[in-house]
Amino acid sequence: MLSSYGAEPLPVDQIAAMVGDGAKKLVLRALKSAGRRPETEEALQRFRTIYDRRLLNHTKPYDGILDVVRRAADIAALGVLTNKPAAPTERLLASFGLASFFQWVTAGDSGVPRKPDPTGLKQMIQNAGASAGDTLLVGDSMIDVMTARSAGVQVCVARYGFGQLRGEMTLEPSELEAGLPADLGPIIERHIRGLC
């Protein structure tokens, strides 16, 4: 996208640190870092076209996460709450064999306010016939932590995710964290057992 405006590409780690608050903010941050200021909506559309074309080129689940999701689906109802649009979200889930494990997918264009607004999460909780106390939100950014807090649910922060690259994470003592994908399984199981 930057190249289409005559800008030099930015290093991958610099771009990765900009990820996590939606495509619009990513595009704005990238344009600013590259010293460009074209029309944001036009740049956002360019980004989405390129992103869609290259969606599966480098994206893959974290090592071990497929097993974690499979085991979690055996003991709990699972949903995806993302600010990413529905089309790429569903394409990613299907491409990696994950779609069947999630009963609900609420995306950034699903008609509910985006995270950190808790509306989408609360709807999933209601659809599951669960309560806030039954629920564990796994995320990797302060946006996810804020969403969980607003909904009154427990949160587990994936310390290996993109949100960590921005260095903005401040957790309460009762909030959980996973250093590796393999750490999630036991955390999810302990949360479920603690409810029984």
Image (cartoon, rainbow, N blue to C red):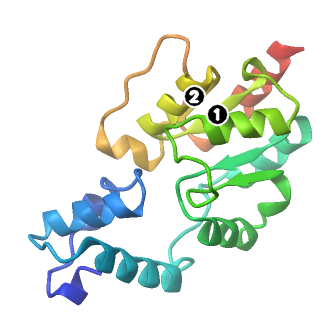
Side of 70 where 145 appears, left or right: left
Residue 122 sits in which quadrant?
top right
Q: Is residue 118 visible?
A: yes
The percent position of residue 90, horizontal first and vertical second, equals 69, 67
Residue 134 sits in which quadrant?
top right
Side of 2 where 64 appears, left or right: right
**Precedes in sequence: disc 2 or disc 1:** 1
Q: Which residue is mark 2?
A: 148
Q: Residue furthest front?
A: 111
Amino acid under label 1? Leu
Residue 118 sits in which quadrant?
top right
Q: Residues within 10 Å of mark 1 (few under 14, many from 20)?
A: many
Q: Which mark is residue 137?
A: 1
Closer mark to the observer between disc 2 and disc 1: 2
At x 13%, y 70%, the residue is: 34
Q: Residues within 10 Å of mark 2 (few under 14, many from 20)?
A: many
Q: Are marks 2 and 1 in contact (CB under 8 Å)?
A: yes
At x 31%, y 80%, the residue is: 42
The kind of secondary structure element at disc 2 is helix
